[in-house]
Amino acid sequence: VKVARVDELPPGRCRAVEVNGLKIALFNVGGELFALEDSCSHLGAPLSLGFLGKDSISCQWHGATFDLRSGAALSAPASSPVGVYKIRIVDDFIEVEV
């Protein structure tokens, strides 16, 4: 599903989108794009408003950190992973598999 144009997500930025009722966070780290469930597994904070690292996102509420590739919880207080979505670029559009 098309969710955004590539130029709407510059490097170092995050963006929230909604697809079929699913909240998805998009991340651009140095030109590499990632898509995760936009809800921290600890208390549901939007990860799209978190702090983007080199290969992780940290929740703004309590600092739980998640791996951008696997969705794995890397630090407390989260212990459960978040969902990961496959992503691809087609004709300058970001598409997410849902």
Image (tube, rainbow, N blue to C red):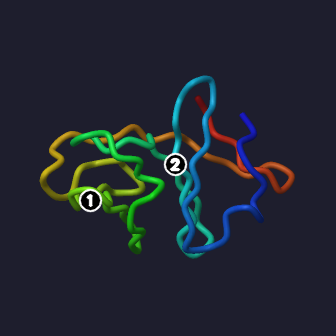
- Residue 68, placed above or below residue 41: below
Find residue 30 and report its horizontal and vertical position in percent: 57, 76
Find residue 5 and report its horizontal and vertical position in percent: 78, 54
**Residue that label 1 marks:** 65
**Residue that label 2 marks:** 25
The quarter of the image holding the C terminus is top right
The residue at the far front in this view is 61
Q: Residue at x 42, y 68 (%)?
A: 52
Q: Residue at x 21, y 57 (%)?
A: 62
Circle 2 residues within 10 Å: few <14, some 14–19, many ≥20: many
- Residue 20, placed above or below residue 17: above
Image position of 24 (left or right of 51): right
Q: Which mark is residue 57?
A: none
Q: Amino acid at mark 2?
A: Ala
Image position of 52 (left or right of 31): left
Secondary structure of the residue carrying tag 2 is strand
Q: Residue at x 62, y 71 (%)?
A: 31
Asked whether disc 1 touches disc 2, contact meaning CB atoms under 8 Å apart, the reply is: no
Circle 1 residues within 10 Å: few <14, some 14–19, many ≥20: many
Question: How far apart in space, not on screen, are marks 1 and 2 (Cα)?
Answer: 14 Å
Secondary structure of the residue carrying tag 1 is strand
Tell me the quarter of the picture where residue 15 sits: bottom right
Viewer-side residue, 73 vs 48: 48
Find residue 37 and report its horizontal and vertical position in percent: 44, 40
Q: Amino acid at mark 1?
A: Thr
Find residue 48 and report its horizontal and vertical position in percent: 48, 54
Q: Residue at x 72, y 34 (%)?
A: 1
